[in-house]
Amino acid sequence: MDAGRRAVSAALLTGVLVSGSRAVAAPTGPERRAGAGARAAAGPRPAASLLGQEIRRLPTSRRVVALTFNAAWDESGLDTVLAELRRRKAPATFFPTGTYAEARPAAVRAMAEAGHGLGNHSYSHPYFDDLSTQERAREVRAADVAIRTASGVEPLPFFRFPYSSTTQDAVADVNELGYAAIEFTNDTNGYLGPAGGMTVDKVVRRAVGSLGPGAVLQMHVGSSADDGVVLDAQALPRIVDAVMEEGYEVVDLREFLVAS
């Protein structure tokens, strides 16, 4: 989908801040078999301005930037990222896959215990444009169950498409499940690592070049290579420095939730 055509108007959202870190019991038995993981009707929901489109820039005119991290490989760099976010008192949103949550529950629990929101990055990281509506629902719901089981908290109603492979139908499907499609203004490409021609300097430049009201930066924890190098973790202090120097504030995506 064309991010330019679908950019929302720069209007400051006045929704109610809702915490996404409320402890809940993991679905079991008949509830799980019935397809648990759909958003609870009484829980926090995305503001209307986040629905009907993929979100690549938040609907605000404020000089704010959202930091987001995908998690699908291992926990390399996670401790560094969490420590830096804690030192800066900066919020972030992590988007683990369901398989990641099942394989590395301690890592997902650490994200939640640090006070950060947990989004949904699908269960097995497939291309959603290749799936039916029913298959998409199974991916989203299975990931929700895995993430809440690992973390002990209620995941946020934010979904990020694997490979950023979005279609209007797929966005409508995840909206119907109660999720906003939170994509990104720019990916730092740190996940490519040194083998992919990336450096810390390049990661920082890509992040700084994306700054603008409501920018959403996509980064990654974990390493897709065997070298364990996580450039986004190494670059994070410089990225946050640049955000502050440019007069921006790191915003919590939970500000864009409203109470049901």
Image (cartoon, rainbow, N blue to C red):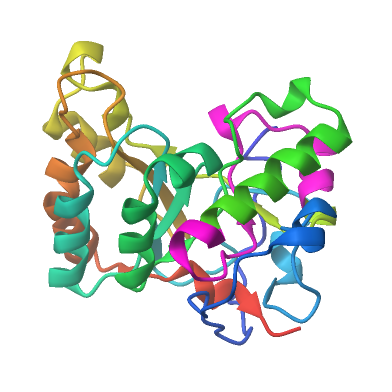
Residue 219: x, y in percent?
34, 42
Highlighted range, magenta = 148-174
Can the viewer see residue 185? no
On the picture, is 181 further left or further right than 66? right
The answer to which image quadrant residue 43 occupies is: bottom right
Between 76 and 61, the one lying in front of the other is 76
The answer to which image quadrant residue 87 occupies is: bottom left
The residue under the point 14% across, 26% down is: 199
On the picture, is 105 further left or further right than 60? left
The residue under the point 24% across, 59% down is: 243
The residue under the point 75% across, 56% down is: 32
Between 129 and 141, the one lying in front of the other is 141
Question: How many numbered tags mark residues here?
Answer: 0
On the picture, is 205 further left or further right than 173? left
Q: Is residue 175 magenta?
A: no
Residue 240: x, y in percent?
20, 58
Can the viewer see residue 143? yes
Q: Is residue 156 magenta?
A: yes
